[in-house]
Image (spheres, rainbow, N blue to C red):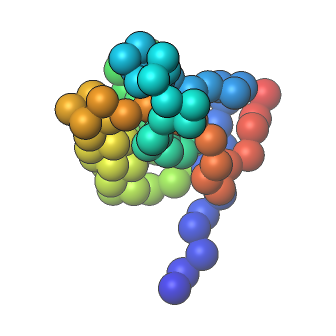
Amino acid sequence: MRPKKTRWIKCDPGERCFVPQSKAKSVREPESILLNLDEFEVLRLSHLAGYSQAKIAKEIRIHQSTISRILASAHKKITAALVDIKGIKVEGGCCKFRD
């Protein structure tokens, strides 16, 4: 399998974990869906900054088709978390931070 190309991201989300209120009270460690740092950054650039996929690809330094796949994966994970009432944890991935 081919190694993943390093993604260069700007926004450091720190330690982020979003937990549904109904689960937070009843369970110590609620089941969570893992959202990688590159998925978090692509969502931020696409939906908050309003960048096109081509501009995001230049920012993160990967191909535009990869941005499309990352965005689809992020949407699927967030939708699953909302529908199945699971937490969302942001961490991991093959990312490096840039200034």
Q: Nearer the viewer, residue 82 or 7?
A: 82
Which residue corresponds to the image point at 57% horizontal and 67% vertical from the top-left? Answer: 4
Q: Residue furthest bottom?
A: 1
List the single residue furthest toward the left: 83
Q: Nearer the viewer, residue 97 or 34?
A: 34
87 sits to left or right of 7: left
What residue is rendered at 60% in x and 63% in y? 5
Q: Position of residue 43 (x, y in %)?
A: 41, 30
- Residue 70's place in the image compared with 22, above or below, is below
In this view of the protein, can residue 89 be seen by the observer?
A: yes
The quarter of the image holding the C terminus is top right
Which percent across, then down, holds residue 17? 57, 27
- Furthest toward the front, the residue is 26
Residue depicted at 25% across the width and 36% down the height: 84
Q: Kindly tell me whether residue 59 is visible in this rendering.
A: no
Q: Position of residue 23 (x, y in %)?
A: 41, 24
How many numbered discs, if any?
0
Q: Is residue 34 above or below residue 6?
A: above
Look at 61% across and 53% down and name the residue there.
93
Q: Position of residue 89 (x, y in %)?
A: 54, 35
Residue 60's place in the image compared with 45, above or below, is: below
